[in-house]
Image (cartoon, rainbow, N blue to C red):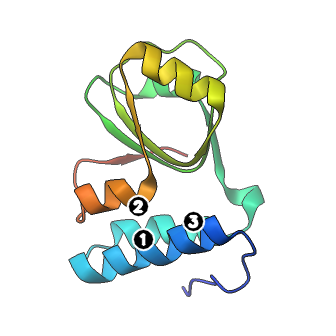
Amino acid sequence: MSVKVEKKTDSYLKDTIQKLLERSRESGSVFWRDIAIRLSSSRKNYATVNLGKLQRIASDDDIIVIPGYLLSSGVFNKKIKVSAFKISEKALKKLNDAGSEFVNLVDLASENPKGTNIKIIR
């Protein structure tokens, strides 16, 4: 499957996809390529996850990647590390209040180039 970066108009999205593909090539891991492919698809196919879903699915100290948007609906009180393409302000506040950490996708790819022990939530 090819990654169609040139069709995207959002420069932040294009940059994120290209950097994830670079990390994938450098590390030989398909994990970040998969995330880049998901982000290069149509926006209607992006994951839209609420904090309530993370509360049900995630355990403390998990690392979660959301190839799409993280929204604030629901109660959240776990200590996890979350990475998503975009996050709402309320969701970020709830994460910080719970003691969780939000990390940019590219930064997480730099921290964990192989993508080990990371869960993808859709």
Query: In terms of image quadrants, where is residue 1?
Result: bottom right
- Disc 2 target residue: 106
Earlier in the chain: of badge 3 and badge 1, it is 1
The relative height of residue 70 versus residue 68 in the rendered view (above or below) is above
The residue that mark 1 highlights is: 20
Q: Secondary structure at mark 3?
A: helix
| Residue sitting nearer the eye, 42 or 109 | 109
| Dot 2 crowding, Cα within 10 Å, few <14, some 14–19, many 20+ | many
Are discs 3 and 1 less than 8 Å apart at CB?
A: no
Which residue sits at x=72%, y=76%?
8
Q: Earlier in the sequence, mark 2 or mark 1?
A: 1
Q: Which secondary structure lies at badge 2?
A: helix
User: Is 8 placed left or right of 30 in the picture?
Assistant: right
The percent coordinates of residue 13 (x first, y second) are 62, 66
Residue beneath label 3, please?
38
Mark 3 or 1: the one toward you: 1
